[in-house]
Amino acid sequence: MSNCCGNNRCGTNATSEAGSAERLRRASPSLSALAGSDDMQTHLRIMQMDCPVEENLIRKKLAGMPAVKALDFNLMQRVLTVVHTPDALDPILSAIRSLGFEPERTDSSSQREAPEEKKKPWWPLALAAVAALSAEAMHWTGMPTWLEAALALIAVAACGLSTYQKGWIALRNGNLNINALMSIAVTGALALGQWPEAAMVMVLFTIAELIEAKSLDRARNAIGALMKLTPESATVQQTDGSWKTTDVRAIAVNSLVRVKPGERIALDGNVVRGRTAINQAPVTGESLPVDKGEGDVVFAGTINGSGGFEYRVTAAAGETTLARIIHAVEAAQGAKAPTQRVVDRFAQVYTPVVFAIAVAVAVLPPLISGAGWQEWIYKALVMLVIACPCALVISTPVTLVSGLTAAARRGILIKGGVYLEQGRKLKWLALDKTGTLTHGQPVQTDAVIFSGVPEEESRRLAASLAGYSDHPVSQAISAASEGVQRYEVDNFEALPGRGVRGVIKGATYSLGNLRLTEETLRCPEKIRAAIAKLEAQGKTVIMLCDAHQVLGLFAVADTVKESSREAVSQLHKLGVRTLMLTGDNTHTAQAIAAQVGIDEARGDQLPEDKLRAVEDCATQGVIGMAGDGINDAPALARADIGFAMGAMGTDTAIETADVALMDDDLRKIAAFVRLSRQTYGVLVQNIVMAIGIKALFLALTIAGMGTMWMAVFADVGASLLVVANGLRLLRK
């Protein structure tokens, strides 16, 4: 086995919140970090803002205002977040309205609160289409030119006034967006007497814009489909004992809710009566129903099987696990991935460059070679239509949103496009043992009591110390002594990675591993031999000691999940190497690693040991760390991608992990890597298509074979292609 990590030892523990928050700050500084102590952060929903065209226009308008400190655009949610001084909101709203937009304040960027966009009447576009087709027919049949011109002007007026209005606003603000470019191109075509073509270009552009908007709405509403999984009402017990159907938003925490067979569960809660099997696929992606009984947790959006039951509500409608998942995915949609940032920077250069080329094409050939002005001006107008980078810019957010939503449907919550992109590069995955590779519920298998203290007394001392700890090994020892009367423990102290210590009846006792014992005692060879024998069987040995001697040994064993073996095998097939980091002894670590197929295993790992191991592996490529998000916090924070196991219903894990697996199935990490590679493949395809189509039509135009209506198809057709290609991820 290769040794990627070296022999490292550990350090202090840390909270998962601090570590993960620091990692997220390094990846993408929040707007709050850019705000001063007196600044405000306002969310504005702008229903007309769904394309980089509008973003650039608004950005240029607001960027020059001293009171505006920072801007964040979420085009998929149509939300603009502005950091500004307290007295600047009204001027900001006025500035946005001057661009022809209607901003609306909203408390959050959640799509769930988005109003429906007003539908536009269809008849002006139909009239424009008929007029444009008639103008084309007039041209081919040799009818009078004035008739062509009249029909063309009717077509342009019927469907193009809004384009002209937007174009004029853009030009007035020094912005060359698609509306400005299209307005110039159509006006130029009319001036050149290309009446039918000018009309057809405007009609085709309007139709294509509508189709593009519908396609974007499909991507935009993909995550909204998750919210529809939650029913709008539930059957709630009233104060008089009767049952009444109640709107979920009006159901308070601790209410008693009844669920019939086949119903969807409306809110999170704990079962208080009845047994059933529940399909949790909407939250966890599990394919098989999960049995639920009294005391078990149920989640909003999941589907009840054939049994009826009652449960006590533990979270209000906006705070359920499903609601938090949706909120996390929506927030992730607004965070730009590396590829998206590169594309945005490229787009800022692309349009001015193509515009400059178009001007050169219109002017230089006639001046240099004496070529006809009309021919080259026409070519320049065609190039103006191609100059908009909409297809290129929209290709990345649509693809990433589709990937994030597809992952959420499988029970994989990814906290941003940066992690979805980075997952394809994963080279090493470090894993905690207990609760990650194993079931996390060890049981006591052996007890060896040495002379000096009666066996019953030793068991009682061990059970007393173990009862104060929530570590799975301590809980196993405590459970094995159920019914044994416990002592009061004073000055109890948990020693991470070693065990526990406390004072009982005035004497100090410890319950921990060999490392803890050797801090105060010299362990006899006889006891070492007994420990080695038990550890060779893959068992974890805990020692009960007083200040002078070892009083007894307690061995516990944890069972490996069947899914762990398959998960490790899948990761190996993807080229990801695995490393187990556990606080258990080296013998146990090696035994578990052999069962699962782990490449490398390290035992006796304290928190700083795991941190250093991850740091060393990070020199060989992208490394992930899978753990519970608390004990493994330093390593999780240092890893390029932190995976929280079994995050279902856990606020901390959902809020702080880079990737939260909504159940404890390690196979989802392999699924995450595959989805990351698929998403990156689609991203590359979209970028190549967007640039390739533009380049092809630019070449055709310069060669004299491009027409204006072909340029419209090249522009909006490319947008439709990349949107459709990105949406494929939702069907995989």
Image (tube, rainbow, N blue to C red):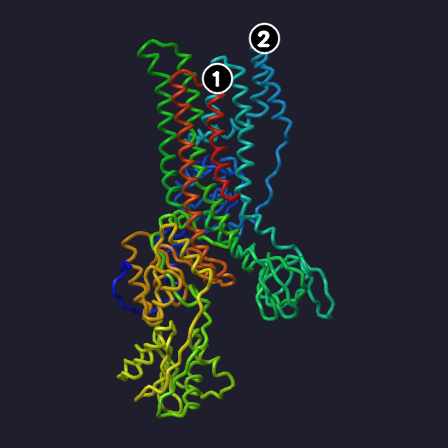
**Is label 2 in contact with label 1 (beta carbons under 8 Å)?**
no
Give SS at disc 1: helix
Q: Amino acid at mark 1?
A: Ala
Q: CA distance from mark 2 to mark 1?
A: 20 Å
Q: Residue at x 53, y 55 (%)?
A: 285
Compared with 130, 478 (above or below) is below
Side of 189 relative to 521 (left or right): right
Residue 560 is left or right of residue 161, and the answer is left
Comes first in the chain, label 2 or label 1: 2
Residue at which label 1 appears: 189
As rendered, which of 335 and 235 lies closer to the eye? Answer: 235
Q: Position of residue 564 (x, y in %)?
A: 44, 60
Instruction: Look at the image and tell me whether residue 168 can be seen.
Output: no
Look at 43% across and 26% down and name the residue there. 386
| Coordinates of residue 159 in the picture (x, y in percent) | 57, 25
Task: Say which mark, if any, is on residue 104.
Answer: none
Instruction: Pick the quarter of the image with the N terminus.
Output: bottom left
Neighbours of disc 1 within 10 Å: few (<14), some (14-19), many (20+): many
**Is 425 drawn above or below residue 22 in the view shown?**
above
Using a 10 Å C-alpha cutoff, classify the residue at mark 2 as few (fewer than 14 neighbours), some (14 to 19) or many (20 or more).
few
With respect to residue 324, does 213 lie above or below? above
Residue at 71% x, 70% y is 239
Residue located beneath label 2 in the image: 141
Q: Nearer the viewer, mark 2 or mark 1?
A: 2
